[in-house]
Image (cartoon, helix red, strand yellow):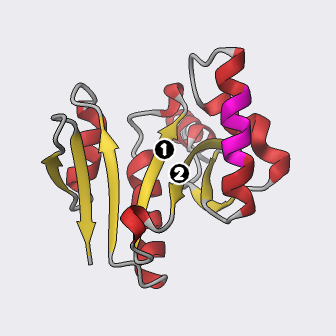
Amino acid sequence: MISHGAYLKFMTKKTNPSFRFADHGEITGLIDVISNLSEEEKEKSKKIMADRINQNQLICVIYDNKIAGFIGWAKNYGGDSQSWFIEQITVKNDLRGNGIGSKLLSYFLEFCKKEKISSVYASVQNKNERSLNMFRGAGGIITKDKKGDNIVKFIY
């Protein structure tokens, strides 16, 4: 017979995250991941997401059978076809701190390697220590641009 504690542990166990390219039917769910957007910002974000989905440049993370976050990127960063720029990586507020963002970033970086991308960049606000630590943990090199903002680089 299974103990009550073991039963609760089994019943509350979350699934490992899975990753896939997003599709147009998920835009509302993707927008819900981003917190504190005005209606105008939501409409702008929907257009950007639709564009990224059309170009296969938006991967979502599924956790506990729901969209938990996403990563979107631009190709040809700085005019270099082998450089990509992470425009946004985000995880739902209530799921942060569970390693989902780190796993999503790792998945994306492995995808970049398979696509033979030589460098990946991102910009991170100075006050966003959690993101800076995530990028550092994944092997990113943090530098500053001319304005003093953080630029993360992954070179392969």
Residue occupying image coordinates x 51% and y 56%: 73
Query: Badge 2: few (under 14), some or many (20 or more) residues near its Cα, within 10 Å?
Result: many
Q: Nearer the viewer, residue 34 or 8?
A: 34
* Residue 152 drawn in magenta: no
Q: Estimate the x, y position of residue 79 in percent, counting from the top left.
A: 41, 68
Which residue ends up furthest to the right in the rendered image?
A: 25
Residue occupying image coordinates x 67% and y 65%: 56
Mark 1 highlights which residue? Answer: 88
Residue occupying image coordinates x 59% and y 46%: 2
Q: Estimate the x, y position of residue 66 in percent, counting from the top left.
A: 70, 42
Q: Estimate the x, y position of residue 115 in percent, counting from the top left.
A: 49, 82
Q: Assign a secondary structure to mark 1.
A: strand
Tag 1–tag 2 contact (CB < 8 Å): yes
Q: Which residues lie in the magenta part?
A: 43-49
Q: Amino acid at mark 1?
A: Gln
Is residue 46 rendered to the left or right of residue 85?
right
Is the magenta region chiefly helix, strand or loop?
helix
> How many numbered callouts?
2
Mark 2 highlights which residue? Answer: 71
Residue 42 against residue 13 in the figure, above or below: above
Separation (CA) of disc 1 from disc 2: 6 Å
Q: Estimate the x, y position of residue 24 in percent, counting from the top left.
A: 82, 51
Query: Badge 1: few (under 14), some or many (20 or more) residues near its Cα, within 10 Å?
Result: some
